[in-house]
Image (cartoon, rainbow, N blue to C red):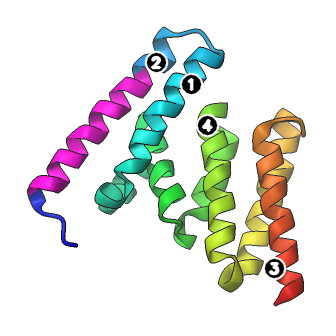
Amino acid sequence: QHTTEAEKLASWQQLQLLVQEYENIRSSMDPGDARTRKMEIVFSKMRSLAITVHPLLGILIKSAFPGERLAAIAILEVLPNIDYVNWLAESLRVEKPFVGYHAAIALLTAVRTLGKESVNELKSIIATAKQELQNSSGDQTDRYKIITEAENELIQLANTS
């Protein structure tokens, strides 16, 4: 179905409110489960807008605002795109753990969706991301576990193709 300009504008405005909500939660609450739960709710709402706002991906990725970069990751979790896997891997390294966690999920989704035709490209990106993550945060984080899962799935894909 075709999205009208009015619907696109409404979705963009909704997304901006969610970006603001994310930024407010992050700055006003102490780290912990309660904050993470609230941020997950916001992220889930961002994901629900992904199809409508995906034309804005290029803008969101370059944003100075972590909330807008998180919105870009939400789009890539719903609509994996091989052109942005390097950016996702970089996000794992440079973003806060919550954003990095979702970048890892988006990479895993990319592996599951695009893996067959992009095994080698994904393998090298994932391997580098995994090594950088291990060096910076160790191998006990959820991000590391998800990247390891992505790597294992790629190895299986490579062995079956």
Residue type pointed to by label 4: Glu
Q: Which residue carries the number 1 mark?
A: 37
Mark pair 2, 3: CA separation: 39 Å
Residue at 38 percent across and 58 percent down: it is 58
Q: At numbered mark 1, what does the secondary structure look like: helix, strand or loop?
A: helix
Tell whether position 7 is magenta: yes
Mark pair 1, 4: CA separation: 18 Å
Residue 25, numbered circle: 2
Give the quadrant of the N terminus: bottom left
Residue 95, numbered circle: 4
Q: Residues within 10 Å of mark 2 (few under 14, many from 20)?
A: some
Q: Residues within 10 Å of mark 4 (few under 14, many from 20)?
A: some
Q: Nearer the viewer, mark 1 or mark 3?
A: 1
Tell whether position 97 is magenta: no
Residue type pointed to by label 3: Leu
Whole-percent x, y for residue 39 in the image: 51, 28
Sequence-first disc among 3 and 4: 4
Q: Which residues are magenta?
A: 6-23
Q: From the viewer's side, name the closer residue of 92 and 40.
A: 40
Q: At numbered mark 2, what does the secondary structure look like: helix, strand or loop?
A: helix
